Amino acid sequence: MTAATLAEVLEPALSENYALAGLVVLGWEDAVAFVEAAEEAGCPVILQAGPGCRAHTPVSVIGKMMRHLADQASVPVVCHLDHGYTVDECRAGIDHGFTSVMFDGSKLPVSENIDLTAGLAEEAHAANVSVEGEVGYVGYAEGAASAFTDPGEAERFDKESGADAIAISVGNVHLQTEKTDGIDFEALLAIERVTSKPLVLHGGSGIPPAVRRRLAKDTKVCKFNLGTELRQTFGASLRQTLEDNPQMFDRLSILKSTMPAMRQSVSDILKTITLV
C-alpha cells in the first residue's frame, strides 16, 4: 500500500460518517505500533510529526521513516507534518516525503492566515500533498487560552484557503491529561452550517471516548489529533517494565516493551471513532 494524502482518507470519512486518528509519533516504536493497530482494525491511519518530534529528529529522517512504513503497510498511511508555523516548514515537509502538511496560522489575522494557506495549498496540491489549516485558536492545558472559532471566519477559510481540512476550536484543548466535557456542540453546529470541508479537533486526548464517538458519527469532525494519552500510555508501560525488570539495560529491549500497550491504546481509539 502506498502512502495516502489526507484528502484521500478524509473524504470517505466525511461522506460515510466516521473519523480517523491523527497519532503523534515521537519515534520508531510508536510509529510501528500505530500502523500495526490500524492494520489489525483495517482502517487508514495518520502518522503525525509535530514540532517536538521535528526538534528531536530531522524532518528529512522522520519523513523517510514514515514513508517506509507507509509503503510496507496493508492500509493507507498518511504522513502528516503537524503544526508547521511557517510556510517554509511546510515546504520542507513536502520536500522530504510528507503527504500532508498543516500550516498553523491560527495566531495570525484571518486574512493573512487565509492568504498564506492558499499559497501553500497551491504548491502542495501540485505535488499531490494535502493541506490542513486552522482557524480560531486551540489553547493548551495550563497554558495559552483558546479562542473559539468564529463561524464567519470559518466560512471564509473554507471558501478561500484551499485547505483540504480545517482545524477548529470549540472547547478542545492541547495537552489535556484528563478527560473533560468541554466540547461546545452549539458552536460546532454553527461552524458546520457554513463550511463543507472535513473538520479536525486537536487536543483529542481530552475528549471522552463517548463524546468522540458522537462527534465521529453525527458531525463533520473527521480527524482527532491524539498525543497526550499515548504518551501517558508509553510512560506507564515504560515505568512498569523497569519496575518489573530492574536488571534490564538494553535500550532496544526497553523501548520494544512499550509497543503492545501502545498498540492496544490505538486499537481502543479506533474502535470508538471508525467503522470497525
Image (tube, helix red, strand yellow):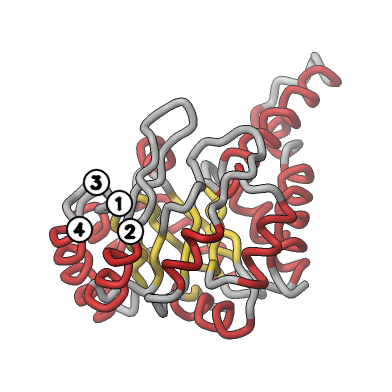
Q: Earlier in the sequence, mark 1 or mark 3?
A: 1
Gap in Å between the C-alphas at discs 1 and 3? 12 Å
**Front residue (pair 252, 192):** 192
The amino acid marked with disc number 4 is Val
- Dot 2 falls on a residue whose secondary structure is loop
Q: Residues within 10 Å of mark 3 (few under 14, many from 20)?
A: some
Q: Quickly name the residue at label 4.
A: 110
Depth order, front residue of 3/247: 3
Position of the C terminus by quadrant: bottom right
In the shown orientation, is residue 85 left or right of residue 246? Answer: left
Q: Helix or strand or loop: what does disc 3 sit on?
A: loop
Pointer 2 residue: 150
Disc with the residue nearer the chain's start (1 vs 4): 1
Q: What residue lies at 49% left-to-right and 75% top-to-bottom?
A: 4
**Horizontal and vertical percent position of residue 192:** 46, 72
Q: N-terminal of the two: label 2 or label 3?
A: 3
* Residue 20 visible in the displayed image: yes
- How dense is the environment of label 2, judged by Cα within 10 Å: few (below 14), some, or many (20 and up)? some
Query: Which residue in the rendered view is the most extreme toward the top?
Result: 246
